[in-house]
Image (cartoon, grey):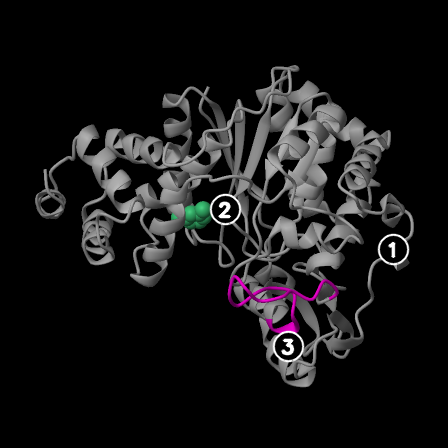
Amino acid sequence: MTIYEIITKKKHNVELSTAEINWVVEGYTLGKIPDYQMSALLMAVCFNSLSDRETVDLTMAMARSGDMLKPDTGGFNVDKHSTGGVGDKTTLIVAPIVASCGVFVPKMSGRGLGHTGGTIDKLESIPGFNTALSYEKFLEIVRTAGLAVAGQTGSLVPADKKIYALRNATATVDSIPLICSSIMSKKLATGADGIILDVKVGSGAFMKIAADAEKLAEQMVRVGKLAGRKVTAVLTDMDKPLGRTVGNSLEVIEAIEALKGKAPADLMEVSLTLAAEMIFTAGLGDESACKKMAEEAVTSGTALKKLRQMIELQGGNPEVTEDYSLFEKSKRQKEIFAAEDGYICGISCEETGMTSLKLGAGRETKESDVDPTAGIVFQKTVGDRVQKGEIVAVLHTSTDCDIDEIAEEFSNVFRYGSEKDCPPKKNIIKIIKGY
Ligand code: URA
């Protein structure tokens, strides 16, 4: 077999065999297949797609390219993955809720890149919090507290690292089978029994259209099922930022407030739905019982205690949950005022993420430092009535960025209209279960 023959087959829309897919993934990971040939194959996949069988084979070959972890916690392990959003702090809320209900959450998370934030950057805004744990230490904390959130350990899915970087540079990211295999290979390699996928839909998401998001969700669920995992996909709205904050410490504080029962309605609904699905996956009751368990974990304060325990075991100061002055404060703030009388009908999500990045909360390259204090606090959101000149948001930064210029651009993210121009949108669009 040669890579030339394999590219030719895919160019003519002929199915590749399992052996051919394994050979390509291994050859590319080991550097035996050059980037230019792999790029040609990826482009052929973008045009002609992959069958379900090919997608499963690609996912499994990628998952097996590095360590296949098996978190030995003695219980049911559940993982959650978000396809990436703006203001998405749900992991910080959901993981303590689920762990306090007796389900183990060994969660490996990523850093922010581009306009979307990352859980690891958010947690590192907690003074002392360590996300660089050895796998042994990570598991020890999960066994003790029921949860830990850390950066990836060991050599997980090296094939995805190489293929994703190449896709980024060759305009081959937006292919459903390629996105599916990239996400699911990482989820399968981390070894959870249950996987909940939060598939974001809207202007701030990767999938702008619900039909595409649904196709991706269905494929990921099918692949997970064929790999013997219990997978559920929850399609959630990402046409506006989730909750009222965007930025690292700002989002951690909002997540703590959520665990005290004081979150905005959209954030609470998405978090409780994801948590209930994770508890349901572990077989702890029917859907409504699991939703009730999740709600009670918040109202009883047990979920907040879990978060404090995890913070302490990972080297952070748990007092941050009671005293927000322990977080570093932003050095500069700038208020944004409503440009018109009326209703806020839209907040451009991608531009909000880009503003947060320019303020210092995100990273333009993998190596950039993030400002833990930077970000945006929305005083008003979609559906709120405002008067011209009223404060709608406050920008925060400790960097030397041009906050006046950023504020001027940011004023344009708000779309104003009358009440009838702002019909309420669903936060949860659809739930797809694979078991
Ligand atoms: N997230 C991933 O991990 N991979 C993709 O291909 C897209 C989003």
Dot 2 beta carbon under 8 Å from ligand 1: yes
Q: Which mark is residue 411?
A: 3
Q: Which mark is residue 217?
A: none
| Residue at image point 65% right, 14% down | 285
Q: Amino acid at mark 2?
A: Thr
Residue 428 in percent (x, y) is at: 57, 40
Of label 3 and label 2, which has the lower sequence position? 2
Of label 3 and label 1, which has the lower sequence position? 1
Report which residue position mark 2 lands on. Answer: 83
Viewer-nearest of discs 1 and 2: 1
Q: Is 129 contained in the magenta span?
A: no
- Mark 2 surroundings: few (<14), some (14-19) or many (≥20) residues within 10 A: some
The answer to whether residue 211 is seen in the rendering is no
Report which residue position mark 1 lands on. Answer: 324
Read off the magenta span.
358-373
Dominant secondary structure, magenta: loop
Dot 1 beta carbon under 8 Å from ligand 1: no
Residue 157 in percent (x, y) is at: 42, 40
The CA span between labels 1 and 2 is 29 Å
